[in-house]
Amino acid sequence: MLSLSFTLAVVAVASILDSGVARSQTDVSNASERSVDILLITGGCCHDYDFQTKAMQLAVKDHGIKANWTVVNDGGTGTDAQIALYDDPEWATGYDVVIHNECFADTKDPAYIRRITKAHHAGANAIVIHCAMHTYRGAEIDDWREFLGVTSRKHDHQSRYPVKIEKPGHPIMANVPADYVSATDELYVIEKLWPRAEVLATSESENTKVAHPVFWTNTYGQAKVFGTTYGHSNDTFSDDVFLGVLCRAVVWLSQPE
């Protein structure tokens, strides 16, 4: 039984109020006929998580994906929370896709982190967004970083970054224009790409001229993972191209091998 110390709500996408989020008109090809069970874990510092949540839910609906959402927004607005969800060893059971969109950079406890990564290693597929890369960045263990597929501890300034598609044939990259430029967002500096990660797209630092992964996939144990370092701003979560990438990642992760 999950603790009442955090908010847990199953959100019906059809009931989402119009929040000014731009809607994509392009359906995802081969969207699953069955409903996808999605667990979204969000909260922490630095971002408008309510807006981002509604944007993702609305985009999934507009792309023709049937979805049942469970949203856990817990931990306040600080950087060092440990949320009660992960006290349950079966916290990820029953979900097709887990979306990590939380930001807790200063949480370091190895046992706590390994309760999260254990579920993913056992097969809980995941999308990891933006500050998920900096979550637990102060930890001495690498389990979370190996799960993400990248190691990052800092970012460049906000700008509109051209995106170079490295794997145009990957289904997640379908319909991404060759001349795509991000909405105003932060570019994360990637220190390390883990061995089982595959880069789908990169953006170049305006400071160092070094290209960094911005979209990628990873394999962690039995789990498939899609990651993006973009997702700081409401502009990004109003960008049809970015939202389309997330929607295709949902479909890719939820389809059987």
Image (cartoon, grey):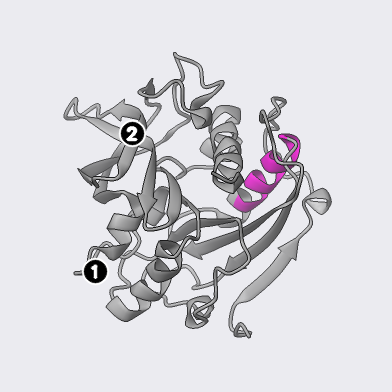
Question: Are dots 2 and 1 in contact, CB under 8 Å?
Answer: no
Q: Residue at x 60, y 44 (%)?
A: 255
- For label 2, the residue is 199
In the structure shown, which secondary structural element does the residue marked by tag 1 occupy? loop
Q: Nearer the viewer, mark 2 or mark 1?
A: 2
> Which amino acid, mark 2?
Val
Residue 145, horizontal then vertical, whole percent: 29, 57
Is residue 124 rendered to the left or right of residue 10? Answer: left
Q: Residue at x 54, y 46 (%)?
A: 253
Residue 171, horizontal then vertical, whole percent: 52, 29
Residue 257, horizontal then vertical, whole percent: 54, 44
Is residue 21 rendered to the left or right of residue 148? Answer: right
Crowding near pointer 1: few (<14 within 10 Å), some, many (20+)?
some
Q: Residue 56 colored magenta?
A: yes
Q: Residue 23 colored magenta?
A: no
From this view, report whether residue 121 is shown above or below residue 150.
below
> Which amino acid, mark 1?
Ala
From this view, report whether residue 66 is shown above or below residue 185.
below
From this view, report whether residue 180 is shown above or below residue 17.
above
Residue 19, horizontal then vertical, whole percent: 72, 45
Q: Is residue 121 visible?
A: yes
Magenta stretch: give its range.
Answer: 53-63
Which circle marks residue 219 in the picture? none
In the structure shown, which secondary structural element does the residue marked by tag 2 occupy? strand
- For label 1, the residue is 139
Q: Main secondary structure of the magenta part?
A: helix
